[in-house]
Image: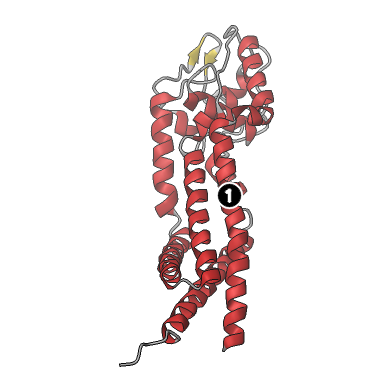
Amino acid sequence: MGCLMTIGRIFLIVTNIIFLLIGLVLLVVGLIAKFGESLFKSYYESIIASLEDSLSKAGYGDVTLDFSLSELAGSLPIALIVTGVIIAIITVIAVIGAVKKAKCLLLIYSIVMFVIIAAQVLTMGMFYWKPEMITAPVKDSLNSTIQSDFAGLNGTNVVSIGWNFVNQKFQCCGIDNYYDFSEATNWVKNLSSGALVTPLSCCKTLPSSADLSCAQSPLSTSTNNYNTGCFDEIWDLALGNVAITASIISVCLVMQIIFFLVALCMYSDNSQNKVKPKG
């Protein structure tokens, strides 16, 4: 039993040091995303330049798109920073508790791990059996911003630039399809060359002249991504192969259960070995 406890203690320390490094990486990435805009410019500069060039050639004049990836990301950088800090705090508690055999820290860590495991199991259940409980609110929120703020290819607000960027970057159109833009109140669809059915950014190649037929009726899959939803494209990119993703999450869950059991056993062992005063 003592040998197993020693192995478990070493495993707890080493793996939590690794997770501490992961937490620090998330913290740094969040800080860079929030305050290091210049480091990401190479990722989107070419697409923004092509949007501006297309606007000029399509007759919109010289339009400068003030695109900010950190503004588009919204609260994501803050979420990364907070997540990194939380992971760092939890892992430090685990490492100090295991090294010093501190009962109080081990108990706190055990409780935290139990809560995390329960929340993760619940989230996984929703994620794989009821994904609409997660995706539906996100889609509703995105649809609301499109209806109120999207202004087309020449829109200079973050919603317009963001959707034009996403449509081009991922070769898609809207959340589920081009119908998502039909109720956009700020999007001017009736132009001198005819009415637009989809935003110009849904064209496979941005217009290089006043010919805007790629976004006008009749639509063609050879020139327009009107039936390809961006949400599924990004969802698949983020999650990848479901079997691989599920395997990775399952491994992490098993490790967390081991962490919980080891910490709990160490806490119980310390309690049993405590010397009681005579009398």
Q: Which residue is mark 1?
A: 24
Which one is nearer the viewer's eye here, 136 or 58? 136
- Residue 67 vs 20, above or below: the answer is above
Whether residue 249 sits left or right of residue 46 in the image: it is left
Up the image or down, 160 lies above or below 271; here it is above
Q: Which residue type does callout 1 highlight?
A: Leu
Estimate how packed mark 1 is, as few (under 14), some (14 to 19) or many (20 or more) residues with alpha carbons within 10 Å: some
Q: Is residue 134 above or below residue 159?
A: below
Q: Residue furthest left?
A: 279
> Residue 214: percent from the left, percent from the top?
62, 23
Q: Quadrant of the C terminus?
A: bottom left
Tell me if residue 229 can be seen.
Answer: no
Q: Position of residue 26 (x, y in %)?
A: 57, 47
Q: Give above or below for 17 relative to 177.
A: below
**Which corner quadrant of the image does residue 106 belong to?**
bottom left
Quadrant housing residue 17: bottom right
Count of marks placed on residues: 1
Point out residue 208 in the picture as x, y percentages from the top left corner: 68, 15
The residue most toward the bottom is: 279
User: Is residue 79 rendered to the left or right of residue 207?
Assistant: left
Direction from residue 35 to residue 131 in the image, left or right: left
| Foreground residue among 69 and 65 | 69
* Left or right placement of residue 230 versus residue 134 in this view: right
Q: Can I make out residue 267 in this image?
A: yes
Image quarter of the N terminus? bottom right
The residue located at (62%, 79%) in the rendering is: 7
Q: Residue at x 63, y 36 (%)?
A: 170
